[in-house]
Structures are given as C-alpha cells and as structure tokens.
C-alpha cells in the first residue's frame, strides 16, 4: 500500500484511567500554515476494531501494536503503548487508500471537523498538460462543440481608466472528454478596450454574450470554422456594471442582472425585450429554469427572487430571504436534483427548489479557506469549489460531505469552467506562473 505525505497528523501526548480502563486523547491536526486541531477519546480496543475493519477491505494495512493478555497498569507500559498507537495512527493517515475510506474518516471524525481533507487525490494522477498565459485570466468558458476553451485575460495597466481585455480561444488536439495529451493551440486572439465581468454561452446557437463593467452587452457567435464572428454593436443594457448573465434557452435570449438592481432581457440582435427593477439592493446572479419559464435571481442582501418570464417580461412570483441578510455572492440552480446552491462570504448553503417547497434549507458547508470560484456538476449533484490556496474541493450536496480534495494549482485559483456532458473542469491560476489546466471529473 502506497504511503504519501498526509494533510493530517496525529499526536497522543497523554492518557487517563477511568474505572480501570485506559483512554487516549487522540489529537488530529491539519498540516497547514495556520493549523486547526481536534481531539477524540479512544481506547486500545477501538484501535483494534479499526484495524480489523480496515483489514477486511484493504490489503497491506499497517500492523497495530501488540495485544497483552492482562490489563496494563504500569505507567511505563501504558506510555510505550501510547507511543506505538501514535505511530500506528500516522501510518494509517499516510496510506492514501485508507485515508479515503469512510471507516478511517469516521474513526478520526475527519468529515465533522475538516471536511476539506476528507479524501485526497494526487495532483499528478489527473493532471493534463497546462497552457501558460501572458495575462491574468478573469473568466473561463467552454465550447465542447468546437473542443475549445475561451479565456478572458485582463491586461494589467497603471492607467486605471483604461480597461483592456483579451478574448482568446484554445483548441485541444483531442476531445476534452478523452483527457487530451497534446498542448492546446491558440485559435484566435481578440483585444477589447473594455472590462468583461461575465460570460454566457448558448450551445444551441453557438453564441457567446459578454457583460461589461460599463453595463453593455456584446454578442458574438462561433462560425463552423471555429472562428469568432465580428462583434455586433454593443447593447447598453444596464446603467452600472453587469454582475451576471445567462441564456433563456426556449426563446434564446440573454438575461442579465447588475448593480443597478435591474434584470434585463436582450435578444441576440441587441434588442431590449424587458427591463425590470427587482428588490432594493444590487443583484449578484441570475439563472434560467427554461422548463418552468422562470429565472432565479439573488442579491447582495441575502434575498432570492423567482420571476416568471414566459410572456417575455420579468414578473416577480416569490421572494425568499435565505441567509439572514448575509450577501449572496453567487448561486447555481440544479434542476435535476431540485436544489439552489448559494455561496456566502464564509460558507456554502443549499436549498430545496421544487413545486412543493421553495426555500427549505437542505445543508451548509463552511470553507476552511476563502472560495475564489466554483461550479455545479448537475448530473452528480456535486459542487466544485476552488480556493485561494490552489485547492479544488468536490462537495457532494446529497450527503453534505466532501467527496475529495485536490491540489490543482500552487497558488490561488482565479476562475473555473465545467462541461456538464463530459465532466471536464478547466481551472486557471491567479498569479505567476499563469496557466489554464483541464481536469477530468470521474
């Protein structure tokens, strides 16, 4: 069984005797710059039962300390066993297969106290060749139909009034779903003298829509050759920055929200279909439920709005205050599993979204490190969260547990995109060396 460096370590510094039974306070600590720790109280028989349970499922489990026929009463013998149990526990932690088992996680209460370390996946096991970039990536988007990754790179400039973005596309030599082994090639590179804040892609039309800090929308379509057509005239959709944009798939038009508290529907040819004020605070995200003909909108004051858009106008149906006025930074809607997921400043929360109950809280997960970006893998009801330490955490919303934790980059992850059909994730780093990496999500 392979041993690797474990993100957690165990210390057993003392023991206590209660009614002739020896107990060991087992302290588990995270191996981070700012460690956190917790303690579980165990007997020798508990370790024995753990060893038996692991040996039934795995080969090569490290041997546990030897049993004795009589109860230990001598402090010297008890201390010797204490040291041996500490060595044994750390050997278990260092075995990746054992570390990932539910038996060991339950024994050390890992899921309860440090869910981000509940399972481990090595960087080298899924790493596909990366693409090194020249400028920081603010947004990522996938076009599986063209086997293409779109990046929005922002040029660093001392002149704060001058905003420059580069739209670049990279073509992979083989389909994203087959884990390409070749370096991706640059297809096109377009400079925009504006700051792109959000992107949406309509797969049925092969069309992109870009929202900007100035409140304008740009619409461009992919040609069969994989080239991007010339940009249409921008549409002044909002008075302030656009926070988020999505596509309404039935009527095929863009829906955007922004700091001006308005939701705006814009056709692909730039015509404003509707513009409605929603709530009293800046809007932060929007998602379309095309099947029901509704959109889900969140704002920075912890409110969620459900609007009817079947008649090409936004009619407010329901308002839900989900988070005690804490700002909702962004949200995702999973229609398959009927759940709304919201990112708050320090935690993730998810709520039921069904005909029977809209807004009932289903679960919470507190992040150990600041979440920088995230996406929803709808089919498996899994949220992929990236953090400022370069980690990618896969949170199962059905169980509320972390599925696994992966070191995706050496520093903070800036952006993420996920292809729902193939399960491939694209991540980009924030600082030098700047790179984009694709990952298969099994």
Image: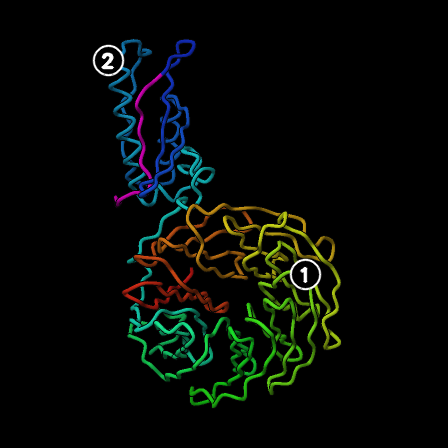
Indicate the secondary structure of the residue bearing disc 1: loop
Residue 295 drawn at (x, y percent): 66, 67
**Which secondary structure is most common in the magenta stretch?**
loop
In the rendered image, residue 198, in percent from the top left (x then y), is placed at: 51, 71
Tell me the residue at 62%/49% (across/down): 323
Secondary structure under tag 2 reads helix
Residue 360 to residue 427: above or below: above
Distance between the Cα atoms at labels 1 and 2? 69 Å
Q: Residue at x 53, y 75 (%)?
A: 214
Residue 46, picture quadrant: top left
Q: Give the residue pinned by disc 1.
A: 280
Sequence-wise first label, 1 or 2:
2
Q: Decide: is 53 above or below 207.
A: above
From the top left corner, tell me how far across and down residue 384 is, in percent.
46, 57
Q: Is residue 436 left or right of residue 228?
A: left
The answer to which of 425 and 50 lies nearer the viewer is 425
Q: Mark 2 — residue?
A: 76
State the extent of the magenta-drawn residues as a range: 1-15
């Amino acid at each position: 069984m392979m041993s690797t460096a474990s993100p957690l370590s165990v210390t057993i510094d003392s023991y206590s005797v209660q009614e002739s039974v020896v107990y060991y306070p087992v302290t588990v600590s995270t191996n981070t710059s700012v460690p956190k720790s917790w303690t579980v109280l165990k007997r020798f028989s508990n370790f024995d039962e753990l060893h038996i349970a692991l040996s039934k499922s795995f080969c090569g489990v490290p041997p546990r300390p030897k049993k004795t026929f009589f109860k230990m009463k001598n402090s010297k013998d008890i201390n010797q066993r204490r040291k041996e149990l500490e060595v044994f526990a750390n050997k278990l932690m260092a075995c990746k297969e054992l570390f990932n088992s539910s038996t060991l996680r339950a024994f050390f209460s890992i899921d309860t106290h440090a869910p981000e370390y509940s399972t481990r996946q090595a960087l080298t096991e899924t790493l596909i060749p990366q693409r090194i970039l020249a400028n920081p990536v603010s947004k990522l988007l996938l076009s599986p139909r063209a086997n293409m990754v779109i990046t929005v790179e922002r040029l660093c400039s001392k002149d704060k009034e001058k905003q420059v973005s580069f739209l670049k596309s990279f073509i992979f030599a083989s389909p994203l779903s087959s884990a390409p082994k070749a370096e991706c090639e640059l297809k096109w590179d377009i400079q925009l003298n504006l700051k792109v804040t959000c992107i949406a892609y309509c797969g049925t039309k092969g069309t992109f829509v870009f929202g900007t800090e100035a409140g304008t929308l740009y619409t461009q379509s992919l040609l069969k050759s994989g080239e991007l057509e010339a940009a249409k005239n921008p549409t002044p959709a909002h008075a302030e920055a656009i926070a988020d944009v999505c596509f309404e798939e039935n009527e095929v038009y863009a829906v955007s929200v922004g700091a001006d508290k308005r939701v705006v529907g814009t056709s692909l040819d730039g015509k404003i279909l509707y513009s409605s004020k929603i709530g009293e605070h800046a809007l932060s995200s929007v998602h379309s439920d095309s099947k029901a003909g509704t959109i889900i909108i969140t704002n920075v004051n912890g409110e969620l709005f459900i609007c009817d858009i079947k008649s090409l106008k936004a009619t407010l149906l329901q308002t839900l205050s989900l988070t005690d006025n804490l700002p909702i930074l962004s949200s995702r809607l999973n229609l398959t599993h009927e759940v709304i997921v919201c990112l708050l400043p320090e935690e993730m929360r998810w709520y039921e979204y069904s005909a029977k109950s809209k807004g009932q809280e289903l679960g919470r997960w507190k992040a150990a490190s600041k979440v920088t970006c995230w996406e929803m893998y709808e089919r498996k009801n899994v949220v992929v969260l990236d953090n400022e330490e370069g980690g990618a955490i896969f949170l199962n919303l059905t169980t509320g547990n972390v599925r696994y934790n992966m070191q995706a980059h050496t520093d903070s992850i800036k952006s993420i995109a996920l292809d729902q059909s193939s399960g491939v994730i694209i991540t980009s780093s924030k600082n030098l060396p700047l790179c984009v990496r694709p990952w298969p999500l099994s």
